[in-house]
Image (spheres, rainbow, N blue to C red):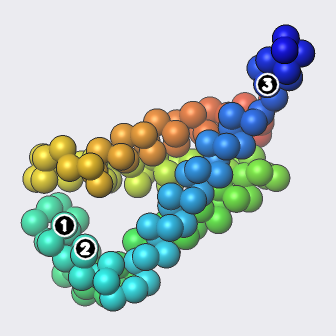
Amino acid sequence: MKALIDKFRYSDIDMVLLRISVIFIIALFGNYKWFEFEVEALKPLISGTWLSFLYDIFGFHGASYLLGIVESIGYIALIAGFFKPKAGIIGDLVTIAIGVTTLSLIPQYGLKSFLVKDAVLLGAGFVLLKYDLNKAMPD
């Protein structure tokens, strides 16, 4: 049992599982942005917030697609981070930006579960950022 525990302690399985989890979440919600149901779901969320400028510039569909592009860049960079930590850093920063942006909506909408989950995403982004920085810039 000690050997198994030691193998776990000295492995990167935690970072691999965290990265896969974040990729799954961002890919899922990012790919939703390309569909009409998500365009409609975003309207009441974005309209009453500081993000409403996106609708003024890009329209409803364009704003949703822009968010989808940003999130796609994020999860693709996170996938690349398995092999290239510097690419992972880009994905980590996008993950952090998604978390900060979503959490900034709490003053308007309160502690709704779809917003609060991004606190975990924000934390995961920082954990992955530290990991990828250490891999990209070893001592």
Q: Residue at x 42, y 40 (%)?
A: 120
How packed mark 3 is, by other alpha carbons closer than 10 Å (few <14, some 14-19, many 20 or more), is few
Q: Which residue is mark 2?
A: 42
Residue 137, x across and y down, in percent: 76, 34
Q: Which residue is mark 3?
A: 8
Q: What label sits on residue 108 in the rendered view?
A: none
Q: Amino acid at mark 2?
A: Leu
Q: Is residue 1 above or below residue 114?
A: above
Q: Amino acid at mark 1?
A: Leu
Q: Identify the element where label 3 is drawn.
A: helix
Position of 64 with respect to 126 (left or right) is: left
Task: Kindly indicate whether the residue at mark 3 contacts the one at mark 2 (C-beta within 8 angstroms).
Answer: no
> In which quadrant will I find the N terminus?
top right
Q: Residue at x 57, y 34 (%)?
A: 127
Q: Which residue is mark 1?
A: 45
Residue 25, x across and y down, in percent: 50, 58
Task: Kindly indicate whether the residue at mark 2 contacts the one at mark 1 (C-beta within 8 angstroms).
Answer: yes
Position of 13 with respect to 46 (left or right) is: right
How packed mark 2 is, by other alpha carbons closer than 10 Å (few <14, some 14-19, many 20 or more), is some
User: From this viewpoint, is residue 58 visible?
Assistant: no
Q: Is residue 125 above or below residue 90?
A: above
Q: Nearer the viewer, residue 73 or 138?
A: 73
Q: Amino acid at mark 3?
A: Phe
Q: Identify the element where label 2 is drawn.
A: helix
